[in-house]
Amino acid sequence: MISNHRYYLWLTLTEDYGIIMIETTRVFAMLFCFYLSSVTVYAQSKIDSLLQVRQQAQHDTTRIQTDILIAESLRRSNFDSSLFYLNRALDVSKQNRNEKPHFEGVVLRTIGKTYWVNGKEEGVPFYRQALAVFAKLDEKKERAYTQADLGKYFEAMSEFDSSVYHYERVIERNLADGTDYSMVLSYNNAGLDYFYQRKLDKASKLLLDGIRYVKSKEDTMSLRAFYMNYGLVLKQQEQFELAKRYIKKSRVIHEVMGNVRSVALTYTNVGQILIKQDSLDEAYDSFTKAWELTKDMNLSTWPTAEYHRHLSRIEMLRGNYQQSHDYIVKSAENLPDYGVAPQTRGDIYGSLIEQKMILADSVFANNPAKQKQLWKEALPYAVEGWKLADHSGAGNVRHRLAQAQANLYGRLKIFDKAYQFSQLAKEISEEINNKARTEAIAKMTTEYQTELVEAQNESLKQSQKAQMAQLKQQNLVIYGAIALLVLILVIAVIIYRSRLKLKSANQTIEKSLSEKELLLKEIHHRVKNNLQVVSSLLDLQSRGIEDEEALSTFMEGQNRVKAMALIHQKLYQNEDLATIDFAEYAENLMKELATIYPSAKLVQTKVNSKSASQFDIDTAVPLGLILNELISNAYKYAFDGKSAGELNVSVEPLGDGQHQLTVSDSGEGLPAEFDFQKAKSLGLRLVRRLAKQLYGSVTYSHEEGAKFVVIFTDTLQRRAV
């Protein structure tokens, strides 16, 4: 079954490609009058009137259009009769295919829409046939409207891969043809559907492109949906303040337009952000405002279901587990039978499962019978919720239901299914938390914010140019009207004003530079935060690993992420945002790693730097990863069985852009037959590759312990090569 969605149907009722005779024109007039009057008469009277028009019609175009109107009148009340009239219209349109092929596409599209509004999936082939007709006729407008409608059809079925495919085809053709049919709808809905799938990089690109497109058309009202949906993407990226600003921009436009439901939705979305910011009282007020706006709007029981869902989340965070459970039960009970997207229903079921397990683990921790009862109550919701989530393709909901089922089956001692769903949850988590996507979104957001700043700067420059031009014109008038003495005075005034304007311009430029510097610090800060998120995810993932070798591999990956995060932390903490003091970084890294390895407690560390060791990020990141590997190896292996030891790091310039990093310890060293260049461990292979990336080399020797010497080239010299 298909959930209700808003839709639009574009149907040409008066277009014909032949010669319209006088009799046909008269029948058209009757048809139009009957159609308008049908708004205020009973449905049967309207159908009888349309049947009379068709009986009198002497032109096939009129017969087709009349059957379409009759079918639309019966569409919701009598599905079979509606199809009968549409099939009759289709037969007539096929008979006139050579003269009027356009109408075959119109009828096919209307059949597809009839299946759609009745919650049936069989309408897709008819939309595809209609697309083929309009493509063959090269009717760009009808083809775009039909394909956008098909995108909404798949969207209603929560088949988001298919929906975004059709929206993106509409966008591509519009860009290629210079048209704008269904362009705003396609940008927005495709971006939102990618958000549902948690493909946030693609969602960001489409929504930002859509914002740029709408602004180029000066269509301010159409920005409302883009601002709302882009705010959701930013919320998922934990850019909470920026997300709230975009959602509140959307609210202002909706309030001007009088869209009460959409205004309520902005309060709901802001409430969700406030929960993530741990502002639970403010979140409660925001959700209550949304519910008060919609509860009396005759929207079935959905507003109440959604309201209780959010209250459950708040009470859970407050530690009121019984109250949280009762609210989510009320939410599920108030879910209407129709009109709720599968992923939304599945998400609520996921919350219900979680609350029942939390209640069992907390309030009824000492009551095994009640615990088992709660787990069994959750099981049907787990099965049905997974079906809904898996069908929808919504990434976050699929992950939630997979993890909930893994936990539930584990408690019920159905271990094969628990393992199956835990592995599935892991795969989904890795997909939706892809690091590359996170960085791409941050980059797109930064570029868009930079565009706004640059646009403001350009506007200021144009204003200055206009003022200067006006000033020159005034000077020309003054030069011809005053004497030499007055002219000198005017020139002095002009010079003075020019200095003032120059000072103002300089202040503006300094302000702009300061803003960009703050923006750059924010970028480094966010990159550091994102890397810490990745590190935390690795830490959480590793807690369930019992295999020591696998756990060690996870820790090594986590250490590498921390090493990169430390570089970005140093960059945004420095006054000079371009470089970091690598000697200071090395000291901090050794202290950080010493907290991980027990053998490091009695090791004395020392960092030597004969001169300033300032490196930019292109050199510091690979060099920091090399240092991380060598220090970690020393802590892990060099002092095994020893009561004390020394670990030394030195950085010194060699001239001509080359530098030397030396890491040595007083441990046992590597075996005599060890060939560093043929070492197959991931860490040492990584050291060799990173050294090559820095146009350098690595050598190993045994001198009262292990000694590694890395020769590398700084960024400036590498670019010159």
Image (tube, grey):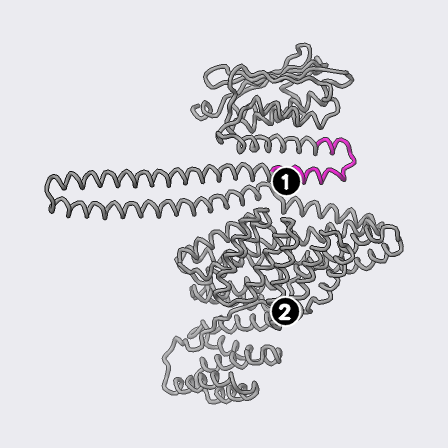
Relative to 206, residue 64 above or below: below
- Residue 454 location, x and y as percent? 40, 44
Report the mark closest to the observer, 2 or 1. Answer: 2
Q: In this view, does 408 lie to the left or right of 539?
A: right
Q: Is residue 637 left or right of residue 480?
A: right
In this picture, residue 148 sits left or right of residue 709: left
- Asked if the magenta segment contains residue 548, the reply would be yes
Report the quarter where the N terminus lies: bottom right
Q: Earlier in the sequence, mark 2 or mark 1?
A: 2
**330 or 118: which is nearer to us?**
330
Q: Is 529 above or below relative to 365?
A: above
Q: Which secondary structure, mark 1?
A: helix
**Height in image: 389 above or below 568?**
below
Q: Which residue appears at 58% of the width and 18% of the height?
A: 698
Give the spatial CA distance, label 2 vs label 1. 38 Å
Residue closer to the observer: 415 or 250: 250
Magenta stretch: helix, strand or loop mostly: helix
Tell me which residue sits at (45%, 64%) in the image: 136
Check contact, mark 2 vs mark 1: CB within 8 A: no
Mark 1, Cα crowd under 10 Å, few <14 / some 14-19 / many 20+, is: some
Q: Which label is found at residue 533? A: 1
98 in the magenta segment: no
Residue located at (66% from left, 33% from top) = 558
Q: Residues within 10 Å of mark 2 (few under 14, many from 20)?
A: some
Q: In which quarter of the image is the C terminus?
A: top left
Element under label 2?
loop
Q: Where is residue 467 in the image (x, y as percent from the top left)?
A: 27, 47
Identified by mark 1, the residue type is Val
Q: Which mark is residue 295?
A: 2
Magenta region: 531-553
Residue positioned most to the top: 704
Q: Nearer the viewer, residue 86 or 429?
A: 429
